[in-house]
Amino acid sequence: MAVVLNAFGFENGNNPFPALWQPNGATIPNVAKTGTYSYLANTTTACVLRIPISGALTDLAVSFWERPAADTADKLYVGVELATGEIVGIRDDPPNGTVDAYIDGVKVLDGDPLLLTWGAVWHHVQLHIILDDVTGIIEAKIDGHEVVNYPGDTIPVGATGTVAALYFSSWDDCYIDDLVIGTDGYLGDLRCVDIRPTADTAQDDWTPSAGDNYSTIDETPASDADYNETNINTDADELALEDFDGVTYTPRAVTAWIRARMEGATGDSIKVGVVSNAVESVTEHLLTASYEYYFHTDDENPDGPAAWDDAAIDALLLRYEAVIA
């Protein structure tokens, strides 16, 4: 069973990684595999995204949908960045119609030929990497067809064999949607279904800039023009959410996210997460003076624990709590 670490559907309409693109050539266009928005690396020079991964992992998996531009230049390089800076992963090869395995810039395996359509067509990409100097793995699937299966040494000489970041590099326009990060093998075709706040509950300590607490944070795209605020330690909101479509989708994990900043202080934090049948599950994040996105993921229902189901998600509450230094 693969484990989901985090998921990004980009349905907030804003860039969740503005500081991580180098250079910052990413936008959130009105083009998507699911929902309304996706992530677009749109630059004529190499545009790199690094999503930091904590925990010194040696096993990482990713699932996402890719829509490359319609020409024959190299497109997308996806993999893991090691603690010492080397990249291990796969790269599109449009002229040959393949996706190939690379270790530290050196091709180690030509992928199986596969008829790909570069242009206005979405392709599902799955990548799984194990870092080991003997029993390492680079394996990948495109649209369910395995195109790369490289067993052997995946740690370059002198490298530290732990994952520092998930790495993307794009040389031209390339859309990305439904990005899911996990471990322990192929993740499958996962989608990020957006569920918005719909009502306040009795737990509504924060003060809205106008209207109700839920209505200041339910818009798409996300807006910083209206907001909830507090300067009191342990103040918390718990907001009811839209129903989940359990007929179309089988839930694998739940990711709660908020957008927040700190004003006129240092050292403040915010807890973000969910409440399931009165059981709270949150992650605490240190705040900065700029608006940023903060996430919390549960692979299992904390009320148990047990696998998520339609009824449990329908009853779920979004929770965020102030931690004032």
Image: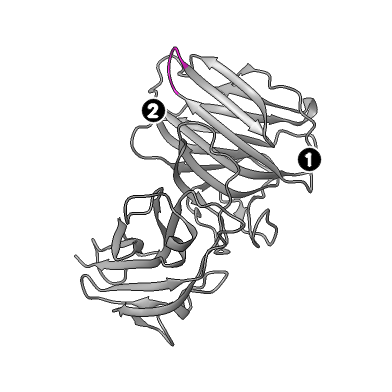
Mark 2 residue crowding within 10 angstroms, few (<14) / some (14–19) / many (20+): many
| 133 is within the stretch colored magenta | yes
Q: Nearer the viewer, residue 230 or 3?
A: 3
Rendering coords of residue 292 (x, y %): 42, 61
Q: Earlier in the sequence, mark 2 or mark 1?
A: 1
Residue placed under numbered mark 1 in the picture: 118
Q: Residue at x 65, y 37 (%)?
A: 76
Q: Is residue 299 left or right of residue 109?
A: left
Which quadrant of the view contains residue 143? top right
Residue 231 visible in image = yes
Rendering coords of residue 9 (x, y %): 56, 55
Which quadrant of the view contains residue 233? bottom left
**Image height check: is 22 above or below 323?**
above
Q: Amino acid at mark 2?
A: Thr
Q: Which residues are magenta?
A: 131-135
Q: Nearer the viewer, residue 275 or 264?
A: 275
Q: Amino acid at mark 1?
A: Trp
The local secondary structure at tag 2 comes to loop
Q: Is residue 141 left or right of residue 57?
A: right
Residue placed under numbered mark 2 in the picture: 162
In the picture, which quadrant includes the C terminus? bottom left
Q: Residue at x 49, y 32 (%)?
A: 80
| 246 is within the stretch colored magenta | no
